[in-house]
Image (cartoon, helix red, strand yellow):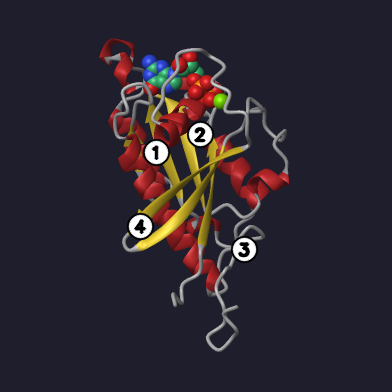
């Protein structure tokens, strides 16, 4: 009998409206890309089962469903998050400049016990658009990420499926590390942690 808990990782995706959050999730989970602006997924979150090392984990990816305005998401949206993905559009300077506000908003709302070590991942989306339209250089984005406790940074395209898998692999890995740390009293109470495991000498039936 497996002595391991079933792991559910809650991942929050934040960033300005239009940067491609829904598209990235859709590409990652459903392998689909749509150019229509309202890429509605019809749910608060999408789930995907992934393997991290030898562990099978369920990732629950929470989208903002168009409520990107600050403070309109509510505490339930943030509660129990294991990783926060911050998305900007490499061709839109403002979406890069607001990354700090999204990060601060997350830290205030989710209030993890150790904000400094909470796992964030930054994604610079729409790299397929091309260098002539590009507004934020790789160097600038990397400097920003390094100055924020070394946040991992990926340049991605939801359209071309560039780097999407690689980025979410790091999201899953860092979320799992956070979840495991919580089991030893770190992080914060996670109300969505579903333990299907029995105690060592408990009844299996
Ligand atoms: P959200 O508001 O952050 O969820 O952004 P959406 O996923 O709805 O995407 C906004 C628009 O950008 C849509 O028209 C998408 O088709 C487009 N889009 C999203 N990702 C990419 C990308 O990687 N490349 C390009 N060229 N367009 C994208
Ligand atoms: Mg969206």
Looking at the image, residue 1 sits to the left or right of residue 108; the answer is left
x, y percent for residue 167: 35, 41
Looking at the image, residue 183 sits to the left or right of residue 109; the answer is left
| CA separation in Å, label 4 and label 3 | 22 Å
| CA separation in Å, label 2 and label 3 | 23 Å
| Label 4: element kind | strand
Q: Quadrant of ligand 2?
A: top right
Q: Earlier in the sequence, mark 3 or mark 1?
A: 1
Q: Earlier in the sequence, mark 4 or mark 3?
A: 4
x, y percent for residue 89: 43, 23
Q: Is residue 67 visible?
A: yes
x, y percent for residue 3: 46, 77
Q: Earlier in the sequence, mark 4 or mark 1?
A: 4
Q: Earlier in the sequence, mark 2 or mark 3?
A: 2
| Label 2: element kind | helix
The image quadrant that residue 24 belongs to is top left
Whether pointer 3 and pointer 1 mark residues with C-beta atoms closer than 8 Å, the reply is no
Q: Is residue 200 above or below residue 112?
A: below
Looking at the image, residue 31 sits to the left or right of residue 95; the answer is left
Q: Which residue is mark 4?
A: 52
Q: Which residue is mark 1?
A: 144
């Amino acid at each position: 009998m497996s002595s391991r808990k079933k792991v559910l990782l809650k991942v929050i995706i934040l960033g300005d409206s239009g940067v491609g959050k829904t598209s990235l999730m859709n590409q990652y989970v459903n392998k689909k890309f749509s150019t229509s602006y309202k890429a509605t997924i019809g749910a608060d979150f999408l789930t995907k089962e992934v393997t991290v090392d030898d562990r099978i984990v369920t990732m629950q990816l929470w989208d903002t469903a168009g409520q990107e305005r600050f403070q309109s998401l509510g505490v339930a949206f943030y509660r129990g998050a294991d990783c926060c993905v911050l998305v900007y559009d490499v061709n839109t300077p403002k979406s890069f400049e607001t990354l700090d506000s999204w990060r601060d908003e997350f830290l205030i709302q989710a209030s993890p016990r150790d904000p400094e070590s909470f796992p964030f991942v930054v994604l610079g989306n729409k790299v397929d658009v091309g260098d002539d339209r590009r507004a934020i250089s790789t160097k600038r984005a990397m400097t920003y990420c390094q100055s924020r406790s070394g946040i991992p940074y990926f340049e991605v395209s939801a359209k071309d499926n560039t780097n999407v898998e690689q980025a979410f692999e790091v999201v899953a890995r860092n979320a799992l590390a956070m979840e495991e740390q919580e089991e030893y009293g770190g992080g914060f109470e996670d109300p969505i942690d579903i333990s299907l495991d029995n105690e060592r000498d408990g009844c299996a039936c």
